[in-house]
Amino acid sequence: MEQQEPKAPHKGIKKGLYVIPTAFTAANIAMGFLAVLWSIRGFDIAASDPVAASGYFNYAAVAIGLAILFDTLDGRVARMTRTATEIGVQFDSLADVLTFGIAPIALIYSWGFATAFNEKTTEHGLGVFLLFMYLMCGAFRLARFNLQATRPRVLKEGTPKLDKKNFVGLPIPPAAGLMAAIVHYSPMPLSFHGEGLARFYAILLMILIAALGLLMVSTLRYSSFKTAGTGRRNLYLVLLIAAVGMLVWLYSKYVLLIVSTAYVSHGVIWYVLGQFRSRPSDEAVEA
């Protein structure tokens, strides 16, 4: 009588673990979906009831912020449980295009450009163009990341190698997070501030969106924090997360704006400081 091979212990549990990262990615998509709907609803009533519209814009901004949390957790959970798969990487990138590409564009247009500029003006057209370029830069950034993740080698001369400690270029979630933090800080439609200030703020917003797009396709290094909290530093990370979480709960408008601005700018600061570091001259090397 043939003996059946014993089943590997916890095989069913192992299969179930693959669902957890996918669930976080699905939650990411849900937040992006709701952010788009709330942005549309806010734009629909921005002229007649700006106070109510600000509530919808704030909901959309908060949804994008929660999506960043889910996007961070799905990757960490996949690495912790060793359930990362190729389809999971692609699924996560598609989710990021919606939540951190299309959703913030819908929010910024509904909250800012559509209320500050007339549709027939040159400024309105320029704002729409910059939003489109932001989306294109974000999609290119995600495609480049996926390629580097599957081929961690030099693709051509001048292309940086894959570094687990750093991202190459600004990731799209922090870029979207900064725009969402701005709306969360001041959710009233730009038209509420008057025609002059609305145009001024919208022009500043255009500059910011253009800068975010350029940073995403740049080769500047941004910390990934993937190795944060390992070893003895784990306790300090828990304390830091608890402190930041409490500050966000008490002063979300200020803390989220500060944190998002700090992350977006730290890559530029590292690059500028790197240019001033002392390097040996060619003569010294030859000697």
Image (tube, rainbow, N blue to C red):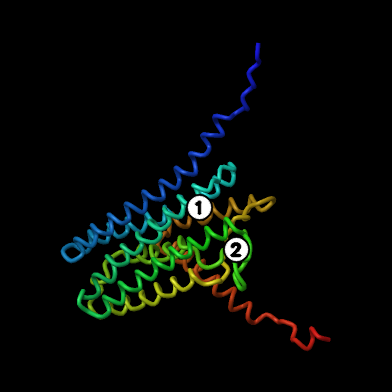
Position of 220 relative to 242 (above/below): below
Left-right relation of 275 to 193: right
Residue that numbered label 1 is attached to: 72
Q: Position of residue 79 (x, y in %)?
A: 58, 47
Q: Are marks 2 and 1 in contact (CB under 8 Å)?
A: no
Q: Position of residue 155 (x, y in %)?
A: 60, 66
| Badge number at residue 4 | none
Q: Position of residue 68 (x, y in %)?
A: 45, 55
Q: Position of residue 60 (x, y in %)?
A: 33, 57
Position of 269 relative to 256 (above/below): below
Look at 53% across and 55% down and name the residue there: 243
Residue that numbered label 2 is attached to: 166
Mark 2 crowdedness (10 Å alpha carbons): few <14, some 14-19, many ≥20: some
Disc 1 is placed on an element classified as helix
Look at 32% across and 52% down and name the residue there: 34
Look at 49% across and 40% down and name the residue there: 20
Q: Which residue extends farthest top?
A: 1
Disc 2 is placed on an element classified as strand
For the residue pair 142 and 40, the one nearer the viewer reads as 142
Q: Which residue extends farthest front?
A: 1
For the residue pair 271 and 7, the one nearer the viewer reads as 7
Left-right relation of 200 to 159: left
- Give the amino acid at mark 1: Thr
- Give the amino acid at mark 2: Asn
Position of 133 relative to 67 (above/below): below
Mark 2–mark 1 distance (CA, rounded to whole Å): 15 Å
Q: Earlier in the sequence, mark 2 or mark 1?
A: 1
The image quarter in which residue 8 lies: top right
Q: Quadrant of the C terminus?
A: bottom right
Q: Quadrant of the N terminus?
A: top right
Q: Which residue extends farthest left?
A: 48
